[in-house]
Image: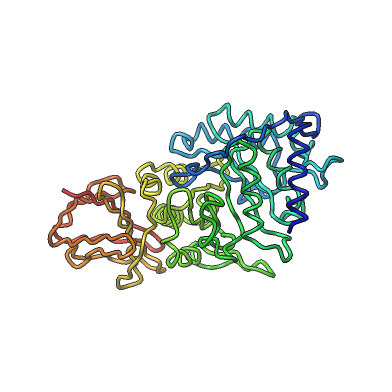
């Protein structure tokens, strides 16, 4: 490990003195290392929201496509709904570094270079994100950052990068915690605030150590656009929405401002039913999860757009307390998830995981809410709340009596309760 740190430090010192060389379009101006420690402790006070290329396009990306996606990001209302980051995943670079060891944006895909694309993203009021990997190679076989952490971080900063997704392929016996600490230090040393997204799939329990290293950290393997059935990929399986949801139950206490459990990107608009997409989005918001859309923004249906831009549901995700919901089971495969919110409001989401419609009929007085982790303790016998359905956007009465609702298969009813 020491040899990699030394090579990274050497690259840092050299680059700080002479600037970075790259292809003509991306010739980087020197980036001064901050004289004082950059205060980066509040880069993600609420879960980051954005869009990522991978789920729809994998490595089939280029400048014209992405500029069109940026335009759609704005015109669709995504930016106005709170989404901020535009993130390039794997496949943006050439297969080899240049003679100076720098990464190079693929000139066929990006003839004007990465700085020009970042400038375009910024001109639309968005922030620009990029991808690399802690190993020798990325997951798609492009150059990884191992041994080049400080050099790569300086290059990203010179391009105007605001977000780095850092994957975990081809890492051999590398120590995960140390590898991510190294890149975290490299990003901070640039003097530019860059949100750091750790993507080591939860294999090394990052929720126990990644707070302060990065702002968000993957807790699971890759997601697939299936509601409750994993997709076998040969040597591994992509995980269903419900499989990933179940993996969040016992780690909710590690979630909070500037250190977010990341259950992977959204598959809304990528082939599931409207009800399944709505349930998927609702549950990620109940978890206070980062929201990274992964659909083709240029071709969104009205239904998909209505899900991704529902500001009342997004407000549950972005609640400043940053508390992830807890769950309790009800009869007939219905779960109730409960999330404390600021100002003593509460979000309650009824999830029907079964393959048939279920009739929900509960007395609020029988559904007292108690959470030892946060101290939530509500008895509806003594406290009354007004209820609002966040998908129909209608008032549904109070918690004085009963609540009856039919929930279709693989769907939710999501309420916000406000004390009267």
Q: Is residue 354 left or right of residue 386?
A: right
Residue 105, percent from left and from top: 75, 39
Q: Residue furthest top?
A: 123
Up the image or down, 78 lies above or below 295; here it is above
Name the residue: 18% across, 65% down.
363
Along the viewing direction, whichever of 158 and 219 lies nearer the viewer: 158
- Camera-side residue: 354 or 129? 129
Q: Identify the image quadrant of residue 347.
A: bottom left
The number of callouts visible is: 0
Query: As drawn, which residue projects farthest toward the bottom?
Result: 331
Residue 274 visible (yes or no)? no
**Quadrant placement of the N terminus:** bottom right
**Extreme front residue here?**
36
Percent from the top left, x then y, of residue 313? Answer: 37, 47
Q: Residue at x 47, y 48 (%)?
A: 258
- Residue 151, visible in the rendered structure: yes
**Picture coordinates of residue 109, whole percent (x, y):** 75, 38
Q: Residue at x 69, y 29 (%)?
A: 116
Q: Is residue 227 left or right of residue 378?
A: right
Task: Identify the residue at the far right of this view.
Answer: 99
User: Which residue is nearer to you in this view: 392 or 374?
Assistant: 374
Q: Name the image colouring.
A: rainbow
Q: Position of residue 30 (x, y in %)?
A: 72, 30
């Amino acid at each position: 490990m020491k040899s990699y740190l030394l090579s990274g430090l050497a690259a840092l010192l050299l680059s700080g003195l002479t600037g970075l060389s790259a292809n003509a379009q991306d010739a980087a101006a020197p980036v001064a290392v901050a004289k004082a420690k950059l205060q980066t402790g509040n880069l993600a006070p609420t879960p980051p929201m954005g869009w990522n290329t991978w789920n729809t396009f994998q490595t089939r990306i280029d400048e014209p496509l992405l500029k069109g996606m940026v335009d759609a990001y704005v015109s669709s209302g995504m930016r106005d709904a709170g989404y901020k980051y535009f993130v390039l995943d794997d496949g943006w670079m050439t297969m080899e570094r240049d003679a100076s060891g720098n990464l190079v944006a693929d000139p066929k895909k990006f003839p004007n270079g990465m700085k020009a694309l970042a400038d375009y993203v910024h001109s639309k009021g968005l922030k620009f994100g990029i991808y690399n990997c802690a190993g020798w190679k990325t997951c798609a076989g492009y150059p990884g950052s191992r041994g080049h952490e400080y050099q790569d971080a300086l290059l990203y900063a010179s391009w105007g990068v605001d977000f780095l997704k850092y994957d975990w392929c081809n890492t051999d016996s590398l120590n995960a915690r140390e590898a991510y600490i190294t890149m975290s230090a490299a990003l901070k040393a640039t003097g530019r605030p860059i949100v750091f997204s750790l993507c080591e799939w939860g294999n090394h329990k990052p929720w126990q150590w990644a707070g302060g290293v990065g702002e968000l950290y993957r807790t699971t393997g890759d997601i697939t656009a299936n509601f409750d059935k994993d997709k076998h990929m040969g040597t591994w399986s992509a995980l269903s929405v419900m499989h990933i949801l179940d993996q969040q139950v016992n780690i909710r206490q590690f979630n909070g401002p500037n250190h977010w459990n990341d259950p992977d990107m959204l598959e809304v608009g990528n082939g599931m039913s409207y009800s399944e997409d709505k349930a998927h989005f609702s549950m990620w918001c109940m978890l206070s999860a980062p929201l990274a859309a992964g659909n083709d923004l240029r071709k969104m249906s009205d239904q998909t757009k209505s899900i991704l831009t529902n500001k009342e549901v997004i407000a549950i995700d972005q609640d400043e307390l940053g508390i992830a919901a807890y769950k309790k089971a009800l009869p007939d495969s219905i779960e109730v998830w409960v999330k404390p919110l600021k100002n003593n409001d509460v979000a309650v989401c009824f999830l029907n995981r079964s393959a048939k419609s279920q009739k929900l009929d509960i007395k609020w007085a029988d559904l007292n809410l108690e959470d030892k982790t946060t101290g939530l303790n509500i008895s509806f016998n003594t406290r009354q709340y007004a209820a609002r359905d966040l998908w129909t956007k209608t008032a549904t009465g109070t918690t004085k009596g009963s609540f009856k609702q039919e929930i279709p298969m693989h769907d939710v009813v999501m309420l916000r309760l406000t004390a009267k």
